[in-house]
Every structure is written in C-alpha cells, then in structure tokens.
C-alpha cells in the first residue's frame, strides 16, 4: 500500500475553479481507479483505467476528467461542472490479470469554498 | 446491475461480545465478495475475500448465495476492531468494485 501516493492530502478550491488531484503508484499495476467517498454513501467509482492511454467512465463521471499517459500516474481533474465536489477522493490500483484485490491510496480531501 | 447493501450504519458492542456486520448483495452472475476496513487515520485496506475462505484477525465471512449475503463475523470483538467496514462486490472483468454504504463498528471496553 505504501506504493500508492496521493497529493495533496488536503485541497481547497474556490467555486468555478478546476483542480487536479494526483495519484502515483510504483506497484507496476496495470489498472487504476478513482473513487469518491461520501458519508453514508460508501465509495462510488468515478473513472478507471485498465491500460495506459485508455480509460472508462464509472458511475459518477460527470464533472470529472482523467488522463493515463503513464502507467504510474492517473491524475483526476475536478472541473467547475461538478455540482458537489466537496468529498474525500480515493485512488486505487489493481494488478490486472491477477487477483481482483484493489489497493488504496491515503486519499485527498477536497473542500470547495 | 450490481448492488451492495449494509443495513447498519452504526454498530456498537462490548469487548468480548460476538459481532456480525451484515451485507446483502444483488447480482445476476457469480460475484466476488470482499470486506474492506478503514481504521482511524489509516487507508482503506482489504480485510478478506470470499474465495480465500480464510480468517483474518479473527473475522470470517461466508458467502450465502441462497440468501445473497456475505455477513462478517467475529466471535469475540476487541477494541482494536473499531473501524469503518465496507462490503464490496466485483462482478466484472475490469475489476470494478461496488461498495455498500459502510458500517461503523465501535467496540466498547
């Protein structure tokens, strides 16, 4: 798990601004995921990527965008179109083709002021 | 569609008492079920998965396909078990996890 880093730990944004959350891994995992964690709602999938240069929308992709230019990195941009962006964001990885266990990063707490 | 339901948001027990965290799922195929745990100030981590059929930290969970349940059990709760517990289901090849709403377990001394 120490092989997944997310930065920053806390992030504050003004309404109308885009902000990018970083997720980096050195586990050599192929698949990466972004989840949003809200109290009482569990974790919901935003985007996922199974391979470099390819990604797919999850259940709540509206207002978010991602890129996967490198295997190690899967940044998430929260755009101004996201209606309720204040949340805890978790990045996860999985060794594609192996067991389905996902490993999670420490998370980024985003607060919109 | 796949869905996971954890009916209890909060669960409190005393140390040494048995504990059961409920999880029910809805999925038409053959799912893989997981329990993840999040201790205070720690990242979310896998506790156990049904195909491993193992006991971790004294916890066990049996997949009941007839009742579509995957309840987490421990015969004697410890204070260090206090945490947020999530039940999750994977039913697709790309590893998407569908999580329940989570149950906060508090074990009192």
Image (tube, grey):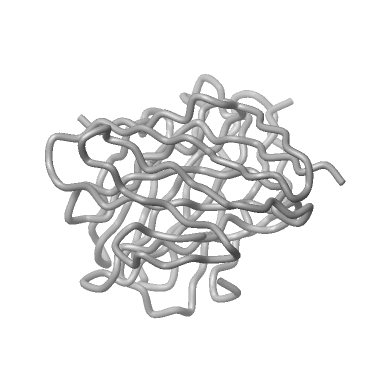
Residue drawn at x 21%, y 35% is B66
Q: Is residue A92 above or below residue A38?
A: below
Residue drawn at x 43%, y 42% is B71
Looking at the rendered structure, the number of numbered marks drawn on it comes to 0
* Residue farthest toward the left in the current orientation of the protein: B29
Residue drawn at x 79%, y 52% is B79
Residue B12 x %, y %: 72, 33
Question: Which quarter of the image is occupied by the N terminus of chain B?
Answer: top left
Residue B29 x %, y %: 12, 42
Residue B68 x %, y %: 27, 35
**Which is more toward the observer, B101 or B109?**
B109
Q: In this view, does A25 lie above or below A74?
A: below
Residue B33 x %, y %: 33, 50
* Residue farthest toward the top in the current orientation of the protein: A83
Q: In this view, does A28 lie to the left or right of B7?
A: left
Q: In this view, does B42 lie above or below B13?
A: below
Q: In this view, does B101 lie to the left or right of B99?
A: right
Q: In this view, does A54 lie to the left or right of B10?
A: left
Specify the quadrant of the image occupied by residue A3.
bottom right
**Which is more toward the observer, B100 or B94?**
B100
Residue drawn at x 41%, y 64% is A93
């Amino acid at each position: 798990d120490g092989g997944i880093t997310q930065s920053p730990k806390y992030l504050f944004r003004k309404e109308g601004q885009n902000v990018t959350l970083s997720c980096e891994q050195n586990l050599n995992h192929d698949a990466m995921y972004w989840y949003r964690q809200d109290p009482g709602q569990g974790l919901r999938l935003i985007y996922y990527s199974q391979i470099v240069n390819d990604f797919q929308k999850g259940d709540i992709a509206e207002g978010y965008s991602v890129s996967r230019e490198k295997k190690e990195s899967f940044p998430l941009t929260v755009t101004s179109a996201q209606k309720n962006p204040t949340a805890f964001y978790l990045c996860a990885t999985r060794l594609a083709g192996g067991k389905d266990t996902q490993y999670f990063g420490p998370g980024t707490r985003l607060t919109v002021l | 569609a796949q869905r996971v339901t954890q009916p209890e948001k909060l669960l409190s027990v005393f140390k040494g008492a048995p504990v059961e965290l409920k999880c029910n799922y809805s999925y038409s195929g053959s799912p893989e079920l997981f329990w993840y745990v999040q201790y205070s100030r720690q990242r979310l981590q896998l506790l156990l998965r049904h195909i491993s059929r193992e006991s971790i930290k004294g916890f066990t969970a049996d997949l009941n396909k007839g009742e579509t349940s995957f309840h987490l059990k421990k015969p004697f709760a410890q204070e260090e078990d206090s945490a947020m517990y999530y039940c999750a289901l994977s039913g697709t090849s790309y590893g998407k996890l569908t999580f329940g709403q989570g149950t906060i377990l508090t074990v009192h001394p």
